Every structure is written in structure tokens, then in C-alpha cells.
Amino acid sequence: MAQQQGNPQYVIMREGSSRTRGRDAQGMNLMAARAVAEAVRTTLGPKGMDKMLVDSTGDVIITNDGVTILKEMDIEHPAAKMIVEIAKTQDNEVGDGTTTAVIIAGELLKNAENLLDLDIHPTVIATGYRQAATKAVEILSSLAYPVTIKDEELLKKFAITAMTGKSPEFVGEKLADLVVKSVKAVIDENGKVNVDDIKVEKKVGGAIGDSELIQGLVIDKERMHQNMPKTVKNAKIALLDTALEIQKTEIDAKIGISSPDQLQSFLDQEEKMLKDMVTKVQKTGANVVFCQKGVDDLVQHYLAKAGIMAARRVKESDLKLLAKATGAKVSTSLDELTKDDLGAAGLVEERKIGDEGMIFVEKCKNPKAVSFILKGATTHVVDELDRAIHDALRVVGVVVEDKKYVTGGGSTEVELALRLKEYASTVGGREQLAIEAFAEAMQVIPRTLAENAGLDPIDVLVSLRSKHEGKSAMKTAGINVFTGEAVDMKKEGVIEPLRVKTQGISGAAEVAVMIMRIDDVLAASKLSGGAPGGGMPPGMPPGMGGMGM
């Protein structure tokens, strides 16, 4: 920063700033990113362990879901945050494979560090990694098998694989069946699946096996008035995005009343207006009303008198799902409401679940929105089950859209490693070393599965390679973590959507290349709390500051 021996000094950074360059910067970033990968590594697979996350208020989350762990970790290091972003992207795109993507990214960075120690330039490594990632996606496509929406038994296996380790095995089959049914219900005419059309309600109480799928919607509301019917069969449903009450003026206004007659006339007129609202609803033939806004007490009385069940303050998202489930149209004005806007359901009923009342809208004809009711003994059990169901729904939705899948259990990664090594020999140059390092990194998945199951990872890898090589090669051979044997994952039903693998490997390669190419880290410490934008707090070792749980 400055010239010595009497030459003038040039200061370009504020006092208190820090700068790390070259191999030191790369080493710090690689170490921080790999530390994140190591944090979730033990959660991979059916025999993966759980993590207990405790926040400052003492709230506890117990999970082995990779993205949940990373979101809850208090990570400040910029390079480590980039690893967390892969998990978030993976979760948004496919809903599963978050831990796999993070572990692969960590292994790619570990192998890159070995190459950097051999004085191979980061740009050369980056080029090789990009070539390998492109080739890996191409190889994965050639390894994929077809699947259709009609293959229900196969689709259940995707759900079971996604939920493995997150829900008890004895209810896995039932939950998988419910997942497939719900996805089939909401698929649109273009073959797309929006899992937001599947509403998940969590209720503590009962057993996991008591979870159920409602062919319709469950609304977390009760009847507005105790005299309203609890059960309505052959329901005609009106959805209102308007208040059933007298609207207040936007400006302050006063009404001058000089006699009791005028007061009574004013009150009678107000009552008539409210009664007219109910009359308009009655004329359409509606016997169930869901209102997004407020409802006057007098309107509630008249609705109850007319034998109409109603709920108010229904969330906008629930109103939209009700429209999809019942075929109703959301009306923004009572004057525009007609019988053609009404939806239909075979049964609308208020029921108690635990201590709370909920309204069930069931027996809808071809509903395009459905509800999952998840039950469990404790809040922690239900929350983890919710995360498992989320993964399963997204995975089944993705495979229904893409119609392609690959095998799990480390089988795909071992095959990729072998194919990429063959490809590396055709490339030549120093990039060949990077592609070989990429291929080696793929083996971290079967190795980790073996370690988490208490098996010898070297023995497992040797066994898997022997199955994948030779004349009688079995490209679907993976590790059965319960027996320790290399078996056919396709026959075992351990399968995953193609997109889970392609997205995970592509994302891991991209972030590894980005972190590896950083050779200069500048951090300015303006405040005692630490540097803005994730810089290093004072007093912390460079590269290690600001990452913890």
C-alpha cells in the first residue's frame, strides 16, 4: 500500500480497512464455503442425522432438511453465503436435493484447492469445471428413464425417496399415495403443476398416520354466527371480495338530526341497506358465503336467519384456492353477483380439530385445489413432516412435468464419475486435470451415504465401481445403506427426478467457479459491529469471522 525508503506514501483505503489477496483470499473463501458444506454433510441419506437449531429466544427446530438448516444458520461470511444461495435456488427449482448440491459444491472447492496447490491457474480450473458440468448434464440426460402421470406406483416411489429420513417408514407409503393423488388433482391442461394449489394445514394431535387429503379446501375459520348451519349439503358457494357492512366515508362527515323520528328513520334506512345485502345473496341461490372482508353483526343475523353458512376475514390466498376448488368466481361487488358466479361442493361442514373449529369444503367436482391435513404428536414432528411433504410434492410435480428420472443411492454419481474421467482423456491439457477433479467430486455422494450409515466408504466405492465397470456393467447400481451392498436402485425404487440432479450439479459448479475466481477480498470496518455487506468484524481471524450457528 505504501512505498518505503523515503518515497512518498499513497494511501488508497480508509484506516481500519483490511485487504486479503492472492492465495490467502482464495484459501479463506474456500475454507469458509467448505465449512458450510461440512455442517450439513451428516444429514444426507436415510441414515443421516438431525440438527437441532436454537435461536436467541430459545425456539427449537429439529430437522435434517439441508435448506432449512442453512437458512437458520447465522452465516456472515460472504463466500459461505454463496453456498447457502445454491441450497435456496435448488429448493425453489425442485424442492429436493439441497444437501446434495451443497456437498458437491464443497467437494468441488476442496479438489480445486488441491489443483491450486499444483500452481494450476484458477481460470484453467474454471474452464475445466464448466466443460465438465456441461458434459455431466448431457450424460445425465442419456441415463434418464421415461415416466408418465399414469405410472402411479412409480410416482409414489419418488415421494417415498424424497421423504426418506424425514418421516417414519411405516406411514411413508400412505403419505406417498396422498402426495401423488394431490399432484394429479392440481395438474393443469399443459401438464404443469403448481404446488401452491395444494394447501397444507398443520395440526398437533393424533398420529402421523392420521394425516389426510381433502378433495377440496380446509379453511381455518369458524362460522360467524352460532345459529348458522354447521353442515350444508349440495352447497352453492359465493366468494366475496367486498365488505358486508356500511362503508365509512373517507372524510369526516356529520349528520344533523333534529328529532327522534329522523333518528329512527336513519336507523331504519341503515338496517334496510344491510338487509338488502343479504337479499342479494339469497337471490343468487347461495347457501354458503366466504367473505374476505368484514361483515356487520346485523348481516350475520340475517344470514343465519336465511340458513346461510358464512365466514369472514378469509385470506385472499384461500379465496383464490376456493375458486379453483369449487369453480366459483370471486365477486368484488354484490350488485354483480349472479348464480353463474357460484361454486359447488357436495359438502361444507364446520368441524373441530383439536381445540379449533375449521370449515371443510369437500366433495368438489374435479377440484383444481386440494388440502393436506398433517397431524403429529408434537409441533416439532408436524413441522418436520411439513418439510418432508413439501419436498415430496415438489419432486412429484417436477417429474410429472419433465417426464424423466434417474436412479439414486449414489448410482448416478458413480456412473457420472466414470464417464467424466473417460471424457477428460479426450480433452487434454491442464483442463483435463480439472475435469478429473470434477469427476472425483461426484463420488462424495456415495462416500457420504456410506459414512452416515456407519459403513466403510472405501469398500463401498470399490464395490460400486466394480458393478459399474466391465461387460456386465450395471449403471443403476447404488448403495443400500441398510445392508451395505451394491444393488440395482431402479429395482429398489430409489429414484429421483432428472431435474434434481441437473440443477444440483449445475448450481454447485457455478458457485464453485465463482468462489474460486476471487483473488482479492476488501473489507472496510466503519462500525464496531463489523464491516458492511458481510465483512469481517474486528478481532476475528481473517476469513473465519462471522460464521456460526
Image (tube, helix red, strand yellow):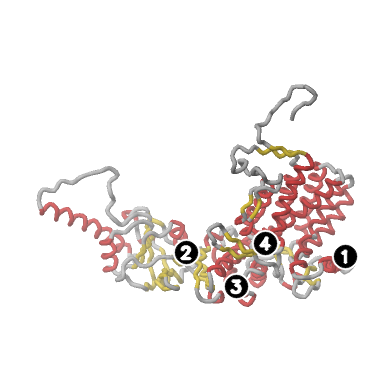
Which label number is shown at residue 353? none
Check disc 4 and report the residue beneath it.
Answer: 403
Taking the image as shown, residue 290 lies to the left or right of residue 251, namely: right
CB within 8 Å, label 4 to label 1:
no
Counting residues from the start of the chain, the first of labels 3 and 1 encountered is 3
- Please give the label number shown on residue 177: 3
**394 relative position to 464: left or right:** left
Few, some or many residues within 10 Å of mark 3 (<14, 14–19, 20+): some
**Residue occupying image coordinates x 72% and y 44%:** 514
Q: Is residue 316 above or below residue 167?
A: above
The amino acid type found where label 2 is placed reads: Ala
Looking at the rendered image, the disc whose residue lies closer to the viewer, 3 or 2, is 3
Nearer to me, 371 or 248: 248
Q: Which residue is mark 1?
A: 469
Residue type for callout 4: Lys
- Mark 3 or mark 2: whose residue is earlier in sequence: 3
> Between 461 and 113, which is closer to the camera in this rendering?
113
- Disc 2 target residue: 325
Q: Answer with the quarter of the image where residue 447 lies.
A: bottom right
Can you tell which of label 1 and label 2 is closer to the viewer?
A: 1
In 3D space, how far apart are the residues under numbered discs 3 and 2 (Cα atoms)? 20 Å
- Extreme residue in the top direction: 7
